[in-house]
Structure formats: C-alpha cells, structure tokens
Amino acid sequence: MSRYMADYKEAPLASRPKTLDPAEYFNLSPEYRRAEEERAAIRARLKRQYQMQLNNPLRKELIEDPALTRWTYARVHVLPNFKATPKTSLLGGLFGVFPLFALYFLFSSDRNKKEQQIKDGTYQRPYRLSY
C-alpha cells in the first residue's frame, strides 16, 4: 500500500471496492489519466462559470442549472421516469399488498373467534351497555 491510499481493511463478507484496488489505483494507462484530467478540467471550468454567475453583483436574472432542471423534472414527472425493478416490486408488495392481507387476516380471525365464543356462550362482553 502507498502512503497516499487510506488504510483500508477488507470486510470478511465483502470484496474490496474497485476504486481501492491497488492494480486499478496505480497501474493506470496514460490515455485513462489524460481522460480523467480532461474531465476534471471540464468540471472545474463549469464550476468556475457557475460561481462567477452566482457571485455577480449585477445579476438580475435567475441562473439556469441544467442538472438541477433535469432533477426537478424527474422528481415532478415520476411515472414516465419510473423503472420497475425487482426491488421496487418487492417494496410495493411489502408496503402495499401485504398489509392489506395481514389486516384482513387479523380482523377476520378475531371476528371468527368472537363469533365462536358467542355461539358457545363463553364470551364475556367487556363493556356492557345494559345489565
């Protein structure tokens, strides 16, 4: 391990993240490094442009952030952007369908037990309205 990498201890049931793999971390091709530097330069340029617009004392208009606009649109228009996955299907079943069946079973079994006790004459009403 290098002195620049964090001292990472692997968990017994999890593999090492790809970003912390020494083979991926140190043995990078010059093309990959150049591409990373170009992406970092683009990010820095966009950040600088946004900061200049944000801190302009003569600014009168709103600053358009395309990423924020896309995110807001996706939040407002959920159904066109929704993708059914096994996780969403499982969560829908757990929080949408399962409680209905559980409540039906709970109420029906309690009602059936009470009806059987009334038929047998062993049911004691907890709150009597008349004696």
Image (cartoon, helix red, strand yellow):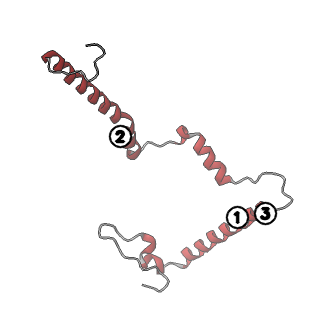
Q: Which residue is mark 2?
A: 94
User: Residue 114, position in %: x, y?
Assistant: 21, 22
Q: CA distance from mark 3 to mark 1?
A: 14 Å
Q: Is residue 114 above or below residue 103?
A: above
Give the left or right position of residue 127, taking residue 42 as reference: left
Q: Which residue is mark 3?
A: 55
Q: Quadrant of residue 81?
A: top right
| Residue furthest front in the image | 131
Secondary structure of the residue carrying tag 3 is loop
Q: Amino acid under label 1?
A: Leu
Q: Amino acid under label 2?
A: Leu
Give the left or right position of residue 43, taking residue 106 as reference: right
Q: Is residue 99 above or below residue 9?
A: above
Q: Amino acid under label 3?
A: Asn
User: Residue 127, position in %: x, y?
Assistant: 29, 21
Q: CA distance from mark 3 to mark 2?
A: 48 Å
Tell me which numbered mark, 2 or 1, is placed earlier along the sequence.
1
Q: Which residue is mark 1?
A: 46
Secondary structure of the residue carrying tag 2 is helix
